[in-house]
Structure formats: structure tokens, C-alpha cells
Image (spheres, grey):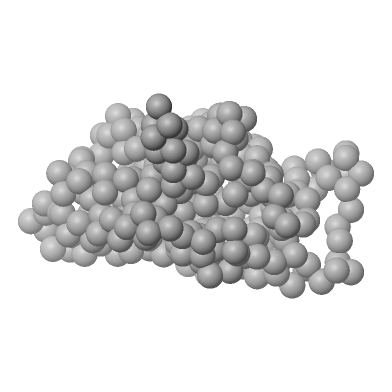
Amino acid sequence: MDARQPLDTKATSLMLMFCLIMSLQQITLKATAEDMSPVLQIALRSGISALLVWLFMQARGERLHFADGSWKPGLLIGALFATEYLLMGESLRHTSASHVITFMYSAPIFAALGLHWKVASERLAPLQWFGILLAFGGIAVAFLGRDSNNNADLLSMLWGDALALMAGAAWGTTTVLIRSTSLSQLPATQTLLYQLSIAFVVLLVFALAQGQISVNPTPALWASLAFQSVIVSFASFLVWFWLLRNYLASRLGTFSFLTPLFGVVLGAWLLSEPLEPGFLFGALLVMCGIVLVSGYGLLKQAGTYLKGI
């Protein structure tokens, strides 16, 4: 029997904090992209965070488990994680941080679709299917709603948006894999260690192969790396995997629409990124779709409560 719970106050508070932190990672990567390529930054933060996770495990007396065969899905989830962040890092070279955040955080939609087929307790209701259609419609509107007279810039931005959307699909697939394999029974630290270690190797090799290794050691860059390594890739991801193990995965996205919302606002404020009306309308549709899909349980409870009044 699945012992995972619907969202409570504790999970809601943690998700709000998680969404705010996640919205800042693309902002900081974009802001320091001229000092160090986003892919190299993500590679280095993954390596530093992997070391922190390993030290954390040693301090708690945790040991890696291999006899149960969990290392096989562990390698696969590490490859997916590396793919997700490789796509995200490359997308930041072509499009704005607010676009990357919005398209990448379509992940709950992809996760809900995968979990519908893999986990009985995560079956989608008709309203959730409508939310998925709404979200994909919003993605289409956001792609088409561009105001640019420069075809080269437009094509570059479209390519960056497509990469960010593929990163969201990879993230959603990662969630499905965690929930539907033996990884769901592993400590969050071991799952995270698989992801960070493999991402470090894959992204570092990619950065070296592509010649993305130049570094301009500014204070902003060191601050970004510290934030990415300790807060984003270590503390926040540990919280995320703990939530996945204890709460229904599709419900965890209830407030995840706040991440692209935060990202759009912070991108415009901190990076002076332009906000196209078409993109904003499409992003709004995506957020509404996420609410219908991931917040279905709460919406259903609210409807039952109102009927009883």
C-alpha cells in the first residue's frame, strides 16, 4: 500500500521555498554566463554538491547500497539528470532566463503523464487531462507569441526555448523513475549522489569538448557558484527527494507554478529581460494547467467542502 500523503502545511511551506530557490538558479546562471558558461557552472556545482552529499552521508553513518540492484536505475537517473541540466545550460545561451524557467517547469505535466501509466495512486482525473491540454496549449502560444524583426535572434530564442522544454521533459521523466523503481525506497542522499556524480562527469566532459572552459573570476561568479552548490544542488534537492518519498508526486507540483512566476518577475527585475505579451499569456496558461494537474486533490477537497456548506 502506498503510504505517501497529500500535501500538508509542512510540505506546502517546503515547496514554496523550493520554488523560490529554483527560480533563482537560472537567474544567477544567466547573470554570470559571461564569466563562466552555464554548463561549466552546473558541472562544478554538481561536483561540489556531490562531495557535500558524500560528507553528509558519512556524518550520518549512511552507506551506499548496491546489492539490491538499485545502482542500475541509479545510473539511468544520473544520466537523465545530466541531460536535464545540459539542456538547461545550453538553453540559457540562446534565450532568456524567464523563458527557460517557464518551459523547464512544465516538468510536473510530463511527470503526471508518466505517473498516470506507472503508478496506480497517481491516475489522472478528467479535470487533470484538461489541465494537461491547457498547459500544452500555453506552451504553443508561448512559442508563437514573439515580437522580433531579426530572424536570426528569433530562431536562436526558439531553439533555446525548445531545449528548455526538453529539459522539463527530462526532469518529469526523472520524477517518474524515482517513484516507479527501487529508487523510491533508497535514502534521498544516495539518489542525489547518483545524479550529482554523473552530472559532474558528463557536463564537465561536454564543457571541455565544446571549449566552454574560460573563467573570469569575479565576486558575482563565486557567489553564484556558492549559491548553486550549497543551496540549490545540495540542500534544496535533498528536500525535494525527501518530499518525493513522503508525498504524492503529482500533488507536489501544486505550487510549482510559482517557480515560473517568480522567474518571470525576477528576470524582468534583475536582468531587465523583455516580457512579450504572447509569451506572458502562454506562460499563464501553462501555470493554470499545472494548478489543475498538480493541485487536483486540493481543488477536489475544496469542492467537497463547498458542497457541504
Q: Residue 17: percent from the left, percent from the top? A: 53, 31
On the rendered structure, is 66 left or right of 110?
right
- Picture residue at 78% right of the left edge, 56% below the top: 186
Q: Quadrant of residue 246?
A: top right
Q: Residue 198: percent from the left, percent from the top? A: 67, 63
Foreground of the two, 18 or 228 = 18
Q: Quadrant of residue 69?
A: bottom right
Foreground of the two, 132 or 152 = 132
- Picture residue at 59% right of the left edge, 58% below the top: 121
On the rendered structure, is 135 left or right of 230?
left
On the rendered structure, is 306 left or right of 39?
left
Foreground of the two, 171 or 290 = 290
Q: Residue 41: percent from the left, percent from the top? A: 54, 49
Q: Quadrant of the N terminus?
A: bottom right
Q: Is residue 121 above or below residue 261?
A: below
Q: Is residue 211 above or below residue 217?
A: below
Q: Quadrant of the C terminus?
A: top left
On the rendered structure, is 161 left or right of 188?
left
Q: Quadrant of residue 183?
A: bottom right
